[in-house]
Image: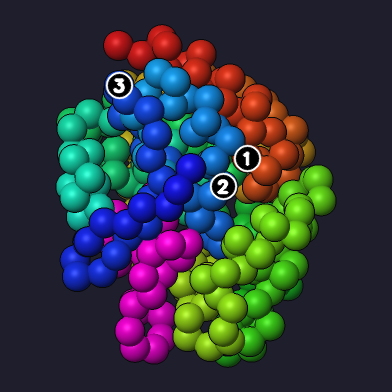
Amino acid sequence: MQLRRVDVLGYRTGYRECGSGPAVVFLHGNPTSSLLWTNVLAVLGEDHRCVALDLIGMGGSDQLPGTGDDRYRFAEQRRFLDAALTALDLDGPCVFVGHDWGGVLAVDRARRRPDTARGVAYLEAGVVPVSWHDGTGPDRELFGALRSPAGEQLVLQDNIFIDVVLQAGTQRTLTAAELDAYRAPFTEPGEGRRAMLTWAREIPIDGEPADVHEAVAAGAAWMSTSTVPKLLVRGDPGAVITGRVLEQCRRWPHQTEVTVAGTHFLPHDSSPQIAAALRTWLAGLT
């Protein structure tokens, strides 16, 4: 499935597309790309128009000029996502499927534009605000360092997300080809790797950053009352949607839950099971 590109806000956004029929939009998170969804698209493309986008600064999308975190903050990623959906004629009713930050963006888009959301499927996504005080936050040793000045060394120089985190969050051993594909946009140390670091700093932990906390909290509140069909793909053992976070998500109405094997990067461990669950769930949507 070849990478394509479309002009969005003066830059190129990468995407992969297959099939025809009702639209399903796939969104990845940190530090992956549309490649995450390749095996899922191959199945669902038999009955649907499947489009997997690369977030700006990641995968086959352009990296933005300049320095610093502001280029890749949540609000900016949302702005590019909205424009990419318009450019690809995906402003009409779609189903959104998101992993990690892609799940957060999917919920946020559905909340802001419920007229475009036929359904929302999410897996290992930070769809509720978290805290280090109640154990719902990410690993404090790692993410505390990433949110400090040490983050520049860990990500911009050491490439920790590609060289360490990807494998740590996957049960099977990733192939050299897979790692090389994810490494390709980030081969040069420095600001070209900034999007990965900014995402780590955008996680709304204990209310910070405040604007991202507000967006995620608004999404969670909307999911708790919305009648939009929802699919929770839970990982066993999982990493993000566990414990109290899982309990909160399970209270959301009009939701189907399935469990697949995997820690965080579930499509790398359970693509056939995820594709089958999505296919069954999609068949029931009106």
- Along the line of sight, the residue nearer the viewer: 283 or 210: 283
Q: Which residue is mark 3?
A: 21
Residues in magenta, as a range: 53-81
Q: Which element type, helix, strand or loop, lies under badge 2?
A: helix
* Label 1 to label 2: alpha-carbon separation: 6 Å
Q: Which residue is mark 1?
A: 267
Mark found first going from the N terminus, 3 or 1: 3
The residue under the point 32% across, 57% down is: 5
90 displayed left or right of 276 = left
Question: Can residue 248 be found in the magenta stretch?
Answer: no
Question: Can residue 70 be found in the magenta stretch?
Answer: yes
The residue under the point 19% across, 66% down is: 9
67 displayed left or right of 114 = right
Judge the density around disc 3: few (<14), some (14-19), many (≥20) Cα neighbours within 10 Å.
few
Q: Which element type, helix, strand or loop, lies under badge 3?
A: loop
Do the residues under discs 1 and 2 have CB atoms within 8 angstroms? Answer: yes
Q: Which element type, helix, strand or loop, lies under badge 1?
A: helix
Residue 116 in the image: above or below residue 103: above
| Tag 3: amino acid | Gly
| Tag 2: amino acid | Leu
Asked whether the viewer can see residue 103, the reply is no
Mark found first going from the N terminus, 2 or 3: 3
* Label 2 to label 3: alpha-carbon separation: 22 Å
* Label 3 to label 1: alpha-carbon separation: 23 Å
> Which quadrant holds residue 142?
bottom right
The residue under the point 65% across, 47% down is: 265
Q: Which residue is mark 2?
A: 36
Residue 169: x %, y % from top left:
72, 53
